[in-house]
Image (cartoon, rainbow, N blue to C red):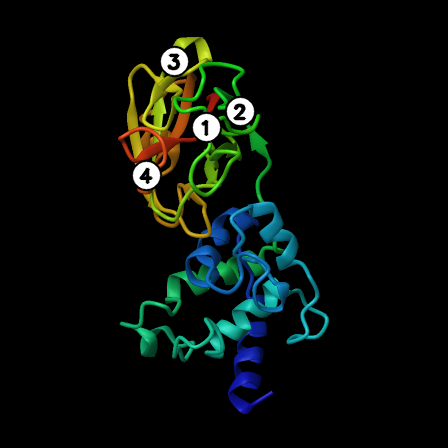
Amino acid sequence: MHVHRVSAFFAFLFALSTPRAAAQTTFDDVHPVFRKYCADCHSTQGNGAFDIANGDIHAAYADSQLPSYFASGQTKGFASLLRIQNGDMPLGAGCTGNPVLDAGNPPCLGAVEQARIQAWIQDGQRPPRPTTGTPYCFGDGSGTLCPCGNTGASDGGCANTVSFSGAKLVAAGAASLAADTLVLRGTRMPNSSALYFQGTTALAGGLGAVFGDGLRCAGGSVQRLGTQTNAAGASQFPEGLDPSISVRGAVTVPATRTYQVWYRNAAAFCQPETFNLTNGVSLTWTP
């Protein structure tokens, strides 16, 4: 290692030895960071066949746990922060690894993103939160037919321009008003804007209604949660400093809510509207 790499390595180890509160950081918290900054090289069997930015969070996590050649005896997830702080990554971005010096250079990670990765490592590189809720309203022909014969798979919405299986939504974590760790994960979408929203009912008894290139599944009183930008075909809500779903969705008492993602699919594909939707997810909030 060069001298600056050695000093960064020992500074990192010292930071990891600092006591922290009860472990709580999971891969859900760092996956958006890797997708945003590393997807160009590490999302589809890229450099070194290392896919820590893969849109599939479970595939990305599995790769993060591979052994590192850079930091002997450590995982690639551990080594990723070392290489970021050394200025090695993102490759060719001209970063120094120092957030102060890198300010104004968009490809470089800031202090908040670096701290998030460090917290995940210090908390034991915990895996993604397990899924919860009940997915419904698929574009596979089991309910309302997709508008243009663009039938999808049995776990997602109607087919789009990047996935014949259709975009997929899952919920993960705890839908608890007292300890809300719920995350909505959308995958198999174009790298465009994605609106996460909440409903109070399942349209057409859960069969859905034609809307754009897909099916509208969540209805009733609709609440917009937030708009994200897909990277590596995926996004999630909340991420970073986003409010929790119970707060953003104004869920204050135990109740059943439905969730879905509307996303831009600008290429001419099906209907005149250039958008599509994921499947829906229904879940019940607990006290």
Query: How many numbered marks appear?
Result: 4
Q: Is residue 232 left or right of residue 47?
A: left
Q: Residue pushed farthest right?
A: 73
Residue under numbered circle 4: 268
Q: Is residue 286 visible?
A: no
Residue under numbered circle 3: 203
Place of residue 154 in the rendered image (x, y in percent of width and height, measured from the top left):
57, 25
Place of residue 164 in the rendered image (x, y in percent of width and height, measured from the top left):
51, 36
Mark 3: few/some/many CA within 10 Å (<14, 14-19, 20+): some
Three-letter residue code for mark 2: Gly
What mark, if any, has residue 150 been given in the picture? 1
Q: Earlier in the sequence, mark 2 or mark 3?
A: 2
Q: Find the distance from the CA under tag 4 to the CA under tag 1.
A: 13 Å
Cβ–Cβ under 8 Å for marks 3 and 1: no
Q: Earlier in the sequence, mark 2 or mark 1?
A: 2
Disc nearest the viewer among 2 and 3: 3
Disc nearest the viewer among 3 and 1: 1
Residue under numbered circle 2: 133
Mark 1: secondary structure: loop
Q: Nearer the viewer, residue 57 or 148?
A: 148
Q: Is residue 218 left or right of residue 157?
A: left
Disc nearest the viewer among 4 and 2: 4
Q: Find the distance from the CA under tag 3 to the CA under tag 1.
A: 20 Å
Q: Is residue 226 above or below residue 202?
A: below
Q: Nearer the viewer, residue 248 or 191?
A: 191
